[in-house]
Image (cartoon, rainbow, N blue to C red):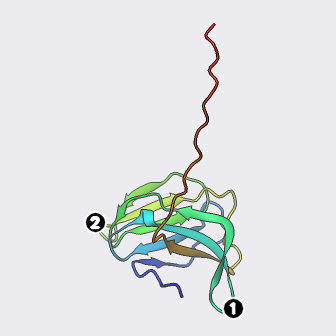
Amino acid sequence: MIANLPELLLYPVEDRGVPNRERIPIYVKEPLNISAYGMMVGQKEISGVARPFIDLLYWFNGGIINQGDWILLYTGSGTNREDDWDLQPGSKIYSVHWGRSTTMFANSLIVPILFKIEAVNIGEGPVDLPQLRLPSA
């Protein structure tokens, strides 16, 4: 069984299927390093679980965010922004962009899957081979 993420609250996708407006709102319930989180996309099944699709992953390349902040993950392209949130002084709204060329959530069975990276192993890279140097002219 996989645990829920109590530190983040995933809201329903807004403007499903609308280019340049489709977005996934996430409310931050406690201070955290957002770099440990990512988003996948999957198909929701009758049982309530969602099966992730292959090759649809977004990593939140960021840093520390605070309780009361919001993340708006837009599925399309755009410029990432950080804005103060007028309705809750001291809180921020982080607008980030997945960079997909099409919308992803027009079908109501397609859902976002928020996840946390608990641990990783990084493989060793290959050894670089010596390069042939061309003589100087």
Front one among 62 and 86:
62
**Residue at image coords 51%, 78%:** 11
Occupied quadrant, residue 13 = bottom right
Whichever of labels 2 and 1 marks the residue nearer the N terminus, that label is 1
**Residue at image coords 56%, 67%:** 23
**Rendered location of residue 61, percent (x, y):** 47, 57
Q: Residues within 10 Å of mark 2 (few under 14, many from 20)?
A: few
Occupied quadrant, residue 132 = top right
Q: Nearer the viewer, mark 2 or mark 1?
A: 1
Question: Considering only vertical position in the picture, is 96 above or below 66?
Answer: above
Q: Which mark is residue 46?
A: 1
- Amino acid type of the residue tagged 1 in the rendering: Ile
Q: Which mark is residue 136?
A: none
Q: Is residue 88 left or right of residue 79?
A: left
User: Could you tell me which quadrant the N terminus lies in?
Assistant: bottom right
Q: Which mark is residue 90?
A: 2
**Residue at image coords 60%, 67%:** 22
**Residue at image coords 59%, 38%:** 128
**Rendered location of residue 129, percent (x, y):** 61, 36
